[in-house]
Image: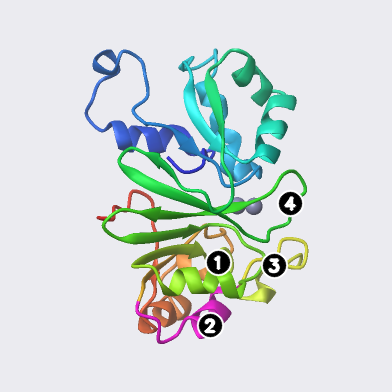
Amino acid sequence: MIDASPDFKSQLDIIHGEISETKRKGKILVSGILLTHSHLGHCAGLWHLGKESVEEKNLPLYCTLEMKQFLSNSYPFSLLVQRRNIKIEEIHHDEGLKMGGLEFMPIQVPHRNEIGDTVAYIIKSKKKVMYVPDIDKWTDEILEEIRSSDIALIDGTFYSKNEIPRFEEVPHPPIRETIDLLRNVDVETYFTHINHTNPVNRKGRESKYVKSKGFKIAHDGMTLEI
Ligand SMILES: [Zn+2]
Ligand SMILES: [Zn+2]
């Protein structure tokens, strides 16, 4: 699983499907969790691994050194470390790791890093998949990685800059501009990490425009063959 969002529990329900808790012996069926960064939308779900919930044992949690320090020193995440609900495995930029039959390569991305740094993941299997849920603005390096992917799941937080009054405080590349940057690129591209203010969540001019340019909008429970 990549990141543990506040929807962690319902996402696990999708993964577990019909497999009962008794059959799973109360354990969760993921090989490990890879974190991108410390913003709550990406790590608050870890709380479900603790004593008050499934009391997981040594679930591998892959993250950077800065994230490791943050989790080890901040309550309530520190409890998960102390009780060994999670076992933190440090990752390094541009160094691949293998899990669940896939290879994951973390790459550093610019994001407002109040606490710790931020990575995106390149997932290598038969296909190359790029996952960049959060970035402040596109860099040439990241755009190049997207262009050379088969599938890309990318930051689609906002459709345009004037969508919320405090855009400068929480910058993300607006979908409208990303489409221009990636036009004529032959990659199956999905916008994800969509804010509630983003009009592409509704039927209308904006979502039609995205689709007319050959881009897709990710949705809960979506499956991709990689
Ligand atoms: Zn973030
Ligand atoms: Zn985020």
Q: Which residue is mark 2?
A: 181
Q: In the image, 55: left or right of 216?
A: right
Mark 4: amino acid = Asn
The residue mark sitting in front, 3 or 2, is 2
Which residue is identified by label 3? 164
Say which label, 3 or 2, has the lower sequence index: 3
Q: Earlier in the sequence, mark 2 or mark 4?
A: 4
Per the image, the residue denoted by label 1 is: 198
Pointer 1 or 2: first along the chain: 2
Q: Earlier in the sequence, mark 3 or mark 4?
A: 4
Magenta region includes residue 178: yes
Q: Nearer the viewer, residue 70 or 207?
A: 70
Mark 1 and mark 2: span between their CA atoms? 19 Å
CA gap between label 3 and label 4 equals 21 Å
Q: CA distance from mark 3 to mark 2?
A: 22 Å
Dot 1 falls on a residue whose secondary structure is loop
The quarter holding residue 122 reads bottom left
- Give the mark, 4 or 1, whose residue is nearer the N terminus: 4
Residue 72, placed above or below residue 161: above
Which residue is pictured at 59% across the width and 52% down the height? 119
In the rendered structure, find residue 121 and report the number of the disc placed on it: none
Q: Position of residue 47 (x, y in %)?
A: 57, 26
Range drawn in magenta: 174-186
Q: In the rendered image, is residue 159 in sight?
A: no
